[in-house]
């Protein structure tokens, strides 16, 4: 075939392009360098690859292998082995082979999101001097980062971000950061979640030696010092800085505001305190500013109005106060504002909002604002999320909301609204994913036209809403909270139709009738709260089908019959409240409820023995409340197998026998409970967190008290009063030194109050009244410095009431009544005979002792005077002796006359 001469240039060009294409893509024209191919095979052989991500690494041109990229001379220049699955399925693991050193042209190495757990970052990486990009992000390395990485002088990008151990501690650390100063070309540095505490405050000096650095992330690095000043500032190229979640505990240093090119500044959760400096206004290029979760106070400086590019502003959870500056309204690019949980006050007005046309999210929760806008105000923005909780909006329902057509999240809780829900509100609800209107005084019935988005979460609790159950179907709900209103009538039988409902709270209303059997079809239900209504009948067996149930509240109704055995099939409950009903029968067989932490069956008509398996199978129990039932038999000693039990309430039953000796083994009652704990339910509802606080009614200091959440977590108590228990109170019970309440009253205990009662050093309330105790009140009782409630009445105690310390403040005479042999303060009965007073003096013999002492002192003084007279002058001594003779003669004469 003839080729026309004019076609030759085109063919040449095509041929060159074809060759180059094959070279670039590892085609068949030319294979990769054999030594580099062998290095990759050796590297692969050291790895575990459960998803066969490296299945192509077998034969042929290695430039065609997955994750391998070559240059035009067929040298391997890039290895991209990042885990694409973002889970453990795709993890590469094993040992990194040093054969990678043979890839002399390698500039790009990405091993991120794999799991090389149990191995150190290899030192040999420091010999791969051609590297410009190194990414080991969250790849499971442990130990100390090798200083040899400082040899990678060509690096532009370094990401060593790590993860925390299951205990929340860093698994990677550095001994020093000096090696970083050799990486003068570095532009991107991420050392997040690595322990840099050994670097002291030199970390800033080292980082300041990297003039090309543009992105720096030191999140959660255990840093606790940041210098207040720098001799010079070299980080002029910095555009991204995130040093969040450290513990600087200092004011924000002013040198930060010299980084005028910053677009992103993350300082949250650092214990920064003091005022926000005016210098914040120098960062005119900022688009993202996060100062949340610190201790900053005072007002927001007016200079914040200079941040004209700002899109995201987070100031939540600080101590800011004062008025919101009007300059905030100048930030027309703002998309999201979160200033929740501060102490701002005053008016939130159109001056702050009318220029924010791009605003999508606004959160002012937990401040002291009053929203003041015109009644016909039409906001310039269309919000996705709005939380004005705790802002005063009322009394009328805010009319301007009807213009917000894109809302997905709306929280108007505790906003002083005292109004009905207007009909137009139904135009907004179909788009809402989350609606919160609690803690208002919204009254009347809900509009019948209300419809909600699929999987909506709706909280209308703590209002004055009334009428029948307001929703014909629960198909669109994940969470529905109508608690603490005035709803009445029966709960509809249709409630259990196929639905994804996870939380249903109808407590504190006036619902009546029976619990629908169809409730058992709510198989996704995690929390069911029907407490404090007027429900009657049996607890339906079908509730045992709610296999995801974590919390069940049916207390304070009129339920009767036996507790269904099906409840015992549930494996996930952490809290069951069936108290204050008329339930009968024996203790329910909760054999599979191993996660149960709180069980309240009090105030019912349950009978029989307390089964031994409670202590053997319910090992997670924190609170066991069985008071005011008809349980009989002895207290099973196996209850002491519950190491976490901190509240045991068996009061007002028919239990008999002694206190089990094993009761001294309640580990949680020995310890003082920590203040950072909380008893509540953090439920994942459709990817969002819903919190429900745990509550418990206890008789403390003679009166019913309701304990909630973090306060309940601090309570340690044992109440076995009002039974038929007998025997002595074991002294070993005083080992429970963390107890706040001990009530043994109303039994048949004999013997003495334990001598070591003073070991219960945290005790606030002690009641041993109405027993048959005898002997004296132990002196150690005066060591109970926190005691505010004491009852020893109606026993056979005798002797002097001890005095001193906190006991002196407990002067109520009823504390000691019914013990006729007690005496001393505060009783008006003096102790007979000898009475111990200060310094061991016997009060009844005080006068005689004084006379005897005076006589002895006078006699000694007389002898001393005579001795002095005899020594000074003999004639005076003779005269004195004659005088004494005459006196003695007269005394003798008087004696004879009397005879």
Image: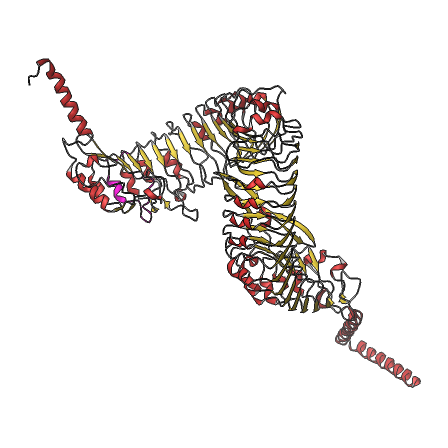
Q: Is the residue 898 above or below the residue 697 in the image? A: below
**Residue at the spot 62% in from the left edge and 19% down from the top edge:** 376
Q: Quadrant of residue 184?
A: top left
Left or right? Give the position of 866 relative to 515: right
Residues in magenta? 112-132
Left or right? Give the position of 144 relative to 850: left
**Residue at the spot 51% in from the left edge and 51% down from the top edge:** 570
- Farthest top residue in view: 6
Residue placed most toward the observer, 882 or 622: 622
Residue 365, percent from left and from top: 57, 33
Q: Quadrant of residue 216?
A: top left
Residue 478, percent from left and from top: 52, 38
* Count of numbered labels shown in the rendering: 0
The answer to whether residue 265 of the structure is visible from this angle is: yes
In the image, is residue 115 part of the stretch drawn in magenta? yes
- Farthest left residue in view: 2
Q: Quadrant of residue 722?
A: bottom right
Residue 51, percent from left and from top: 29, 43
The answer to whether residue 678 of the structure is visible from this angle is: no
């Amino acid at each position: 075939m003839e080729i026309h001469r004019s076609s030759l240039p085109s063919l040449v060009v095509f041929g060159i392009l074809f060759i180059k294409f094959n070279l670039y893509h590892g085609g068949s024209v030319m294979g990769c360098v054999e030594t580099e191919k062998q290095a990759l095979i050796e590297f692969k052989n050291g790895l575990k690859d459960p998803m066969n991500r490296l299945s192509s690494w077998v034969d042929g041109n290695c430039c065609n292998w997955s994750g391998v990229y070559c240059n035009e001379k067929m040298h391997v220049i890039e290895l991209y082995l990042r885990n694409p699955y973002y889970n453990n399925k795709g993890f590469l693991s094993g040992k990194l082979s040093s054969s990678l050193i043979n890839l002399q042209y390698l500039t790009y190495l990405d091993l991120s999101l794999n799991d090389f757990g149990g191995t150190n970052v290899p030192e040999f990486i420091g010999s791969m001097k051609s590297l410009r990009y190194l990414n080991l992000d969250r790849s499971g390395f442990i130990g100390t980062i090798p200083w040899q990485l400082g040899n990678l002088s060509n690096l532009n990008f370094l990401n060593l971000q790590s993860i925390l151990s299951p205990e929340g501690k860093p698994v990677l650390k550095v001994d020093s950061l000096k090696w970083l100063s050799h990486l003068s070309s570095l532009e991107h540095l991420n050392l997040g979640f690595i322990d840099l505490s050994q670097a002291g405050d030199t970390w800033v000096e080292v980082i300041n030696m990297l003039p090309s650095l543009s992105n720096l992330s030191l999140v959660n690095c255990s840093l606790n010092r940041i210098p207040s000043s720098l001799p010079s500032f070299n980080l002029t190229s910095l555009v991204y800085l995130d040093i969040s979640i450290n513990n600087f505990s200092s004011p924000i240093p002013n040198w930060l505001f010299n980084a005028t090119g910053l677009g992103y500044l993350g300082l949250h959760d650092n214990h920064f305190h003091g005022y926000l400096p005016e210098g914040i206004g120098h960062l005119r290029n900022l688009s993202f500013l996060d100062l949340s979760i610190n201790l900053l106070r005072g007002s927001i400086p007016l200079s914040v109005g200079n941040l004209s590019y700002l899109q995201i502003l987070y100031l939540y959870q600080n101590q800011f106060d004062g008025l919101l500056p009007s300059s905030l309204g100048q930030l027309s690019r703002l998309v999201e504002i979160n200033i929740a949980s501060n102490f701002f006050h005053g008016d939130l007005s159109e001056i702050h909002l009318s220029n924010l046309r791009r605003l999508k999210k606004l959160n002012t929760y937990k401040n002291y604002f009053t929203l003041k806008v015109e009644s016909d105000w039409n906001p310039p923005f269309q919000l996705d999320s709005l939380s004005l909780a705790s802002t005063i909006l009322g009394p009328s329902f805010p009319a301007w909301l009807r213009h917000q057509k894109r809302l997905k999240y709306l929280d108007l809780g505790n906003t002083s609204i005292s109004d009905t829900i207007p009909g137009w509100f139904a135009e907004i609800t179909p788009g809402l994913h989350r609606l919160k209107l609690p803690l208002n005084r919204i009254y009347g019935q809900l509009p019948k036209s209300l419809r909600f988005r699929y999987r909506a979460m709706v909280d209308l609790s703590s209002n004055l809403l009334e009428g029948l159950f307001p929703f014909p179907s629960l198909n669109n709900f994940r969470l529905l909270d109508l608690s603490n209103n005035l709803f009445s009538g029966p709960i509809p039988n249709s409630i259990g139709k196929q639905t994804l409902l996870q939380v249903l709270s109808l407590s504190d209303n006036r619902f009546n009738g029976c619990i629908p059997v169809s409730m058992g079809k709510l198989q996704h239900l995690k929390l069911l709260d029907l407490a404090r209504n007027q429900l009657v009948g049996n607890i339906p067996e079908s509730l045992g089908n709610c296999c995801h149930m974590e919390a069940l509240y049916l207390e304070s109704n009129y339920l009767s019959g036996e507790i269904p055995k099906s409840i015992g099939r549930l494996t996930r409950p952490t809290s069951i409240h069936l108290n204050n009903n008329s339930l009968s029968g024996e203790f329910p067989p909760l054999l599979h409820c191993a996660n149960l932490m709180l069980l309240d069956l009090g105030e019912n008509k349950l009978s029989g023995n307390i089964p031994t398996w409670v202590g053997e199978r319910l090992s997670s129990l924190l609170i066991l409340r069985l008071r005011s039932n008809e349980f009989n038999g002895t207290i099973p000693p196996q209850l002491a197998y519950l190491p976490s039990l901190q509240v045991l309430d068996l009061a007002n039953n028919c239990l008999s026998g002694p206190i089990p000796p094993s009761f001294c083994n309640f580990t949680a009652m020995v310890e003082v409970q920590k203040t950072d704990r909380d008893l509540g339910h953090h439920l994942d509802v459709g990817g969002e967190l819903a919190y429900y606080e745990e509550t418990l009614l206890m008789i403390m200091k003679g009166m019913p008290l309701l304990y909630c959440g973090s306060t309940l977590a601090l309570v340690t108590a044992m109440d076995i009063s009002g039974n038929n228990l007998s025997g002595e109170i074991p002294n070993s019970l005083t080992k429970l030194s963390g107890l706040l309440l001990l009530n043994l009253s109303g039994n048949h205990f004999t013997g003495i109050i334990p001598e070591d009662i003073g070991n219960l050093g945290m005790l606030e309330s002690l009641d041993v009244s109405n027993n048959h105790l005898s002997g004296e009140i132990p002196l150690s009782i005066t060591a109970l410095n926190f005691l505010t409630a004491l009852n020893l009445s109606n026993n056979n105690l005798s002797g002097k009431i001890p005095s001193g310390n906190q006991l002196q403040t407990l002067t109520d005479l009823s504390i000691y009544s019914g013990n006729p042999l007690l005496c001393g303060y505060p009783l008006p009965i003096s102790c007979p005979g000898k009475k111990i007073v200060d310094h061991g003096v016997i009060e009844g013999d005080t006068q005689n002792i004084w006379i005897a002492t005076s006589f002895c002192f006078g006699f000694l003084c007389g002898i001393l005077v005579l001795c002095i007279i005899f020594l000074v002058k003999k004639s005076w001594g003779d005269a004195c002796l004659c005088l004494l003779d005459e006196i003695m003669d007269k005394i003798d004469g008087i004696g004879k006359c009397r005879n």
